[in-house]
Image: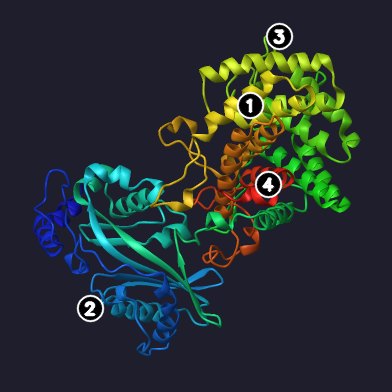
Amino acid sequence: MSFRQLVRLAGAALAMTLFLLLNGCAAPSAETRPGAADTGTHSIPSGLRVAALKDREVPLFGPIVVRSLQGVWPDTAVPAMLESPYVSVYVALRQQGVRLSEAWAEGETGLDALRLALGQARAGLPGGGRPDYVELVLAHDFEVVPLSQWRRSLSNIHRGVWGLEIAHPEGIVRKGPTEMIAENRSLRSVLRDTAEALGFSDAEAAEFFILRRFEAEQILVDLRPPVSATRMFRGNRLVAQSEVTRESVAALAGRMADWMLRNVHEDGRVTYKYWPSRGQESGDNNMIRQWMASRALSRIARTRRDPQLAKLAAFNILHNLWHFYREAEGLGRIEYDGKVKLGAIALAALALAEHPERQAFAGEEAALARSVVHLWREDGAFRTFLEPAERNDNQNFYPGEALLYWAHVFRETKDPALLDKIMRSFAFYRDWHLANRNPAFVPWHSMAYATVWQETRDPALRDWVFEMNDWLLARQQSGLDDYPDTDGRFYDPNNPGYGPPHASSTGVYLEGLVRAFDMARESGDSARAEAYRQAIAKGLRSLLQLEFADEIDMYYISKRERVRGALRTTVYDNEIRVDNVQHGLMAILDILESFAAEDYRLQ
């Protein structure tokens, strides 16, 4: 530790004693190991509850904010929460998504704090700044987080719901939940960046920092006439399950398709990853997901019966072939970053096969098809990499993608030799999956076997699709009362090896589930069909929740046409990846064909 830090920490014990007394806390323990704090900024004690903000009180913030910005004391009714002295207020003034100024304030009451924060933010406006939205956070119910709970309390599920206050030897840092959503920052990154800025290591931060979490009411005030105020949850409007209807889902599909079309660039490439908070496109790429995007573009063209869109999809395919397709010794290869993956080969072949002008790509598809056969083994297993040849991982993904291509070809050709290969792989991977359970395996094999079952009606295929998807249903989340925006996503917190929650995961699981639903209905298995139907309805709610849909959830977005209609990665991570949209769109287009209007209801 530097001499400067030692000097700063010399008065830590006295400052922390004052802090603890002001906040009604017990004496410091070895558990919390508190450090110094600027007690002058801690006028709100820990552990005090304030009156809850009622839904009917939210509209009152419109006139209060407008009059306060005009420098006039509000003469309207005031929510009970603002009468409490234990509310700190954050204000951000925004113009077309850009944050012009911001301020935190406290006062004798919450209303005083609101007026002070609005006044400070107004004073900080740059010349010519004319805000159209006001972002409000009413921070309350502060609680000290013991050291043993830091890790759990900083996990992503709390991001955008709780706020975080860090007391350190030189003062405090307070970060509201809407700030974290707008900046796409995690609670842990706020803590880490604060420590780094002060020159503290992680261990020193644990020694000398005090964390407090706080609850927060989140309100967005639209200053454009007529002025309105909207209560937000995690920087967004909470989508109710009752909003899932055929009409809302069809509209979602239309907006997602429009996003896909807008993100085909002049050279034919598709945006792979976009960071809304930065307004920047990432330089990353992934050829498996790019070829899935090519499939989606062809599907959009077929659905809309638009020849011009078919040409656009072909343009994208030509871009991918020109930059990433190679042929060697008769084998088609999709090369990227020194790798040639079975999944990329198979999905490229499938994208070519599904384009309306398939014959234009017949040579490339045939070479890619030979590569799929080349990587197949007599026992039914697939090698998953052509290059590097020693790699054989990603067995949860690539073999299922290859089988989906084969299933597409078998549906057309009814080739018994191909069916034999498919069934050998079915037997091999059924045993493999039972020994290596993972949700990622389920949708690809479900789609492949459902396609073959439509032709053969083999009960073994049907029963295996049912067994896989019955198991998958237990991975769908619901009933998290404190975090209702997560309802319907697929994630198993008890098995982190299955991977984090992700929009693309929910989308691809729905792709498999709708095929399982069709099989159950056609087989007369009404109980299973109902279970799958309800899971699909809940999954659709999750996709609606993740969409950048309107001015509310895009309050912090400046380049709105780059994100409109796209899906965030999670409710607390706004990164957009092309497969977030592609998988969900492909699933929804199938659901719209399979579901009757009444099927969208949950019960």
Q: Which amino acid does label 4 sit on?
A: Ile
Instruction: Tell us which disc is closer to us: 4 or 2.
Output: 4
Disc 1 versus disc 2: distance between alpha carbons? Answer: 63 Å
- Mark 1 secondary-structure assignment: helix
Where 194 falls versus 99 (above or below)?
above
Look at 71% across and 16% down and name the residue there.
423
Please tell me which of labels 1 and 2 falls first in the chain: 2
In the image, is 247 to the left or to the right of 176?
A: right
Q: Position of residue 416 (x, y in %)?
A: 83, 15
Residue shown at the point (40%, 77%) measured from the top left: 121
Q: Nearer the viewer, mark 1 or mark 4?
A: 1
Q: Is residue 420 above or below residue 477?
A: above
Q: Nearer the viewer, mark 4 or mark 3?
A: 4
**Which SS class for mark 3?**
loop
The reply to whether discs 4 and 3 touch (Cβ–Cβ < 8 Å) is: no
Q: Which color mode does the image show? A: rainbow
The spot of residue 431 in percent (x, y) is 58, 15
Identify which amino acid the numbered label 2 is placed on. Glu
The Cα–Cα distance between marks 4 and 3, rounded to whole angstroms, is 36 Å
Q: On the image, numbered disc 4 is attached to which residue?
A: 588
> Residue 216 at what x, y percent from top left?
35, 63
Residue tagged by mark 2? 108
| Mark 3, residue position | 378
Between residue 518 and residue 157, name the one nearer to us. Answer: 518
Mark 2 falls on what kind of element? loop
Residue 110 showing in the rendered view: yes
- Which residue matches tag 1? 465
